[in-house]
Amino acid sequence: MSDFLEKNPWNALRQFTNARIALGRAGSSVPTEPLLAFNLSHAQARDAVHHPLDADALHEQLRAQGFTTLDVHSAAPDREHYLRRPDLGRRLSDESRAMLAQLSAAPSDVVFVIGDGLSAFAASKQAIPLLQAVCPTLTDWSIGPVVVARQARVALGDEIGELLGAKIVVMLIGERPGLSSPDSLGIYLTYAPKVGCSDAQRNCISNVRPEGLDYPLAAHKLHYLLTHARRLGLTGVGLKDDSDALLPGASGTPAVGDDSNSNNGAA
């Protein structure tokens, strides 16, 4: 068995990916070690979906970084309803809606919303480092309070942004866990957010985590999309992500405002 594994021609490729390749074989099954690793990854993915967001700790960390925060909850009263009724996760609870409606905060250029989504691990681990990377680049932007949203789907940001009078809402939300990424964060941008916006009106940046799209690169892409969204007055299918053309060593001229779309779907 060891000779078979060592001579497997796929072995050299394992250094380039977390995908499960070149696992070897024990009879008609995989060897014990990769089987146990698979079971562990599956358990971590399930835990990510069901693990509750520690909103209090997140508020404390955000305020320690100088952010003003607000706390909201979707219409899904608990995790069971959230998973069975995706529609409830797209609208605010009555209490949260009333609270935001009564605020007298001035309209802002951008409001960031941190939502648990399908992985509270991602929201807890990745959102603050991303904010720390992107906010210093938004020197000429008015930034509203950071909203922490529990039992949240992507579209919840539309109602939040509308009530807060935001020009653009940015939802930072835990993505559906994979077997190698239980803590991946998704970023969704919507210009002129309001209830009823479709996924075609958003742009998405996905797989934000140190092992995937790291914070500096994610912040670079987000800043690019925010800048051109404000200039063009739109997000979604009309806003193309050509931010890679601006990276050191890249060639070519970015083109924005065509029919391409960087939206990869919504949770």
Image: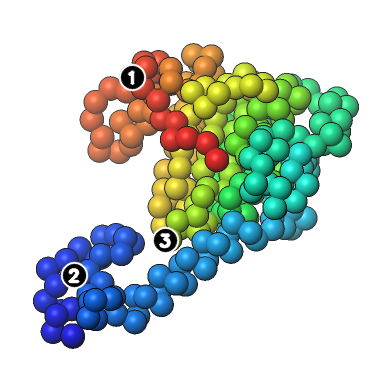
Front tag of 2 and 1: 2
Task: Assess disc 2: are there few (<14), some (14-19) or many (≥20) residues with their C-alpha within 10 Å of its C-alpha.
Answer: some
Would you identify the image quadrant in which residue 181 lies? bottom left
User: Seen from this angle, which residue lies furthest bottom?
Assistant: 2
Residue 116 visible in rendering: yes
Front tag of 1 and 3: 3
- Residue depicted at 29% across the width and 80% down the height: 31
Task: Assess disc 3: are there few (<14), some (14-19) or many (≥20) residues with their C-alpha within 10 Å of its C-alpha.
Answer: some
Measured Cα–Cα span from mark 2 to mark 3: 18 Å
Q: Which residue is mark 3?
A: 180
In which quadrant is the N terminus drawn? bottom left
Q: Is residue 80 left or right of residue 20?
A: right
Q: Is residue 23 left or right of residue 160?
A: left
2 or 3: tag closer to the N-terminus: 2
Q: Which residue is mark 1?
A: 255
Amino acid type, label 1 = Ala
Find out whether the residues at labels 2 and 3 contact each other: C-beta distance under 8 Å: no
Along the line of sight, which residue is nearer the eye, 233 or 246? Answer: 233
Q: Which residue is mark 2?
A: 11
Secondary structure under badge 2? helix
Secondary structure under badge 3? loop
- Residue depicted at 48% across the width and 29% down the height: 203
Residue 69 visible in rendering: no
Q: Is residue 38 left or right of residue 192?
A: left
Q: In x, y percent, where is residue 88?
A: 70, 38
In which quadrant is the C terminus drawn? top right
Measured Cα–Cα span from mark 2 to mark 1: 40 Å
Secondary structure under badge 1? loop
- Residue depicted at 69% across the width and 58% down the height: 52
Q: Is residue 97 above or below residue 115?
A: above
Would you identify the image quadrant in which residue 95 lies? top right
Find out whether the residues at labels 1 and 3 contact each other: C-beta distance under 8 Å: no
